[in-house]
Image: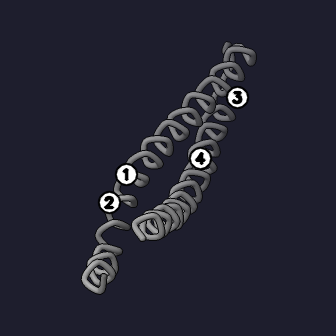
Amino acid sequence: MWNIIENARIKLTLWYLAIIMVVSISFSLGFYRIVAGEFEFQANTLRHRPGLEMEFINDNLLMSRRRFFYRLVYLNGFIFLGAGAAGYFLAGKALSPLHESIERER
């Protein structure tokens, strides 16, 4: 019987995790688009200033976008791990009354 409860706990954890990650990644993508747009705006402002090298501006823009992207990936990785652990704990809490009820009937 414990196997059935543990399988349910894992499935519930995966549902929790899926919901949290969809929200987290959606926010991250939206935030990335906003910040990348701001990077581009600032780069365009700099491109119109005399004396600045275009290659330097373009390289700096690309490097900034990549660093920001990787930071979002790391952040979502931490969210994934934390949400997985919390989801597993909460799924256990949610299923414990069912498990106790089954154990009492035995």
Instruction: Spot the residue most to the front.
Output: 106
For label 2, the crowd category at 10 Å Cα-Cα, with few meaning under 14, some 14 to 19 and many 20 or more, is few
Q: Earlier in the sequence, mark 3 or mark 2?
A: 3
For label 4, the crowd category at 10 Å Cα-Cα, with few meaning under 14, some 14 to 19 and many 20 or more, is some
**Percent position of residue 70, x then y:** 56, 32
Q: Disc 2 to disc 1, how far (Cα)?
A: 6 Å
Image quadrant holding the C terminus, namely bottom left
Picture quadrant where residue 6 is located: bottom left
Image quadrant holding the N terminus, namely bottom left
**Percent position of residue 53, x then y:** 71, 13
At label 3, the amino acid type is His
Q: Earlier in the sequence, mark 3 or mark 4?
A: 4
For label 3, the crowd category at 10 Å Cα-Cα, with few meaning under 14, some 14 to 19 and many 20 or more, is few
At label 1, the amino acid type is Ala
Q: Disc 3 to disc 4, how far (Cα)?
A: 25 Å
Mark toward the viewer: 3 or 1: 1
Q: Disc 3 to disc 2, how far (Cα)?
A: 55 Å
* Residue for badge 1: 85
Q: With respect to residue 70, does 105 lie above or below? A: below
Mark toward the viewer: 3 or 4: 4
- Taking the spot 28% from the left edge, 80% from the top edge, the residue there is 97
Mark toward the viewer: 1 or 4: 1
Who is closer to the viewer here, 20 or 61? 20
Colouring convention used in this rendered image of the protein:
one colour
Q: Disc 4 to disc 2, how far (Cα)?
A: 31 Å
* Residue for badge 3: 48
Mark toward the viewer: 4 or 2: 2
* Residue for badge 4: 32
At label 4, the amino acid type is Tyr
